[in-house]
Amino acid sequence: MAKQAKKVSGVYEKYPGSGDWYIQYRLSPEPGQKQGQRVRKMIGTRQEAIEYLNKVKHIRASGEGIVPSTARIAARTFAEQAVAEKAVSFSTLCDGLLAHIRKHPTEYKDQRNPPQRIAVIKAAFGHRQAASIEPYEIKEWLDGLLGASGEDLAPATRNRYKAVISAVFTFGVEGKHKLKHNPARNLKQKRVNNGVIRYLSPAEETRLRAVLQKDVDACGPQNQQRKKHLMHRIYELDVALGTGMRKSEQYGLRWKDVDFAKREIIARDTKNGTDRTILMIDDVVAAMKALKKMPLPRKRRADDIPNDTPADAVFSVGDNKKWWGSALRKARIHNFRWHDLRHTFCSRLAMAGKSLKVIQTAAGHKTIAMAARYAHLDKTTMEMDLAVLNRKR
């Protein structure tokens, strides 16, 4: 039987077996008080908690620093504080990474989500020196994040925030700031359940198309420009369902990469770092030809912010986020994202009995393991394969 560790006053494990250790101590009492304010702080391992509490005791006894009156402030000697004040702030690292992302749009194709997440992270830790931020503080903050509806963030979204925090620190470690370590590096990712794949059912697609077509039909003869925009939405949906392209691939598409003679689309510099060829089925060819005949002007922006959308962009009307969410609500379709149209593309191939290799190639998956997520939907082929087990009659 393992020897039980000796208890240390002021050091405790709040939830036995969790591995998260805390310390507690009291400040010197104010005049008229019998005892000082109690301070509790989560540290990490038991040994780290013991060492931190000893440091607090040393500062108190020697007077060589200030004993923190709140768990938000780290215990430091005056010498450590002087070094920290000269150190880089977390806000500076956030600004540096953001500038780097905007300067390299080819490397960072998503120019919307990372900046938004950096802003949220900066609001939480921007007032701190980067070197003072501890892993447990990052973990507690991530665990406390809530979505727009007030519910806990989905594991995948939490993992993306963790990845951005880690990228900020990596920017400091690898750049001119000479940060010593990345406290987010070893934090565990939340397990993501990819077992249930959301795809558009035939009934949902019927309702969705009815909503989009109703908006088109409601446009009178005097509003032909708006009618073009509404028809554009239907073609966007047709292309997504007929190609399974990622959103960044679809909305980054240029006419020079569309070959009607060969019925091919070239998606440039995809998520896997390579170009890939996408075959156009009849529905996609029809949608692309309709888009070619009704070019819409690029969205105007402020005079001092030029629109950097290429002149030959296939989809130049802007992001689909607003109209897409509205259409889903009107069609009574819940828990569905634009990316789920890609899942729909793959799922329909699987349900039609197509091989995993076909799904992998058509969707541009890097490995066949990615396509294997849809294997359970291939009921027809599975039933035929299992039929060999029937008794002979």
Image (spheres, rainbow, N blue to C red):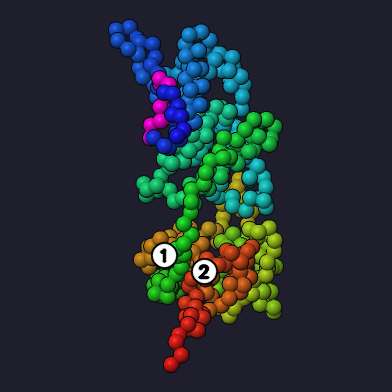
Q: Give the quarter of the figure containing the N terminus.
A: top left
Q: Is residue 281 above or below residue 314?
A: below
**Where in the figure is residue 170, as x and y percent of width and height?**
63, 38
Residue at the image point whose x is 58% and y is 80% from the top: 282
Q: Is residue 11 covered in magenta?
A: yes
Residue in the foreground of this view, choosing between 338 and 165: 165
Q: Secondary structure at mark 1?
A: helix
Label 2: which residue?
Answer: 374
**Discs 1, 2 touching: Cβ within 8 Å:** no
Q: Residue at x 48, y 25 (%)?
A: 49
Position of 379 relative to 91 (above/below): below
- In the rendered image, residue 57 lying in the magenta stretch gets the answer no
Secondary structure at badge 2 equals helix
For marks 1 and 2, give the one nearer the viewer: 2
Q: Going from the N terminus, do you reach mark 1 or mark 2 first? A: 1
Q: Residue 7 — which label?
A: none
Decide if residue 295 is in sight here.
Answer: no
Left or right for 300, reference 22: right
Q: Position of residue 266 (x, y in %)?
A: 68, 68
| The magenta segment | 8-15
Mark-to-mark CA distance, 1 and 2: 27 Å
The residue depicted at 48 percent of the width and 71 percent of the height is 376
Place of residue 123 in the rendered image (x, y in percent of width and height, measured from the top left): 49, 35
Q: Residues within 10 Å of mark 2 (few under 14, many from 20)?
A: many
Q: Height in image: 63 above or below 81?
A: above
Say which amino acid is labelled 2. Answer: Tyr
Q: Which residue is mark 1?
A: 327
Give the prevailing secondary structure in the magenta stretch: loop
Left or right of 328 in this view: 381:
right
Residue 196: x and y in percent read 45, 63
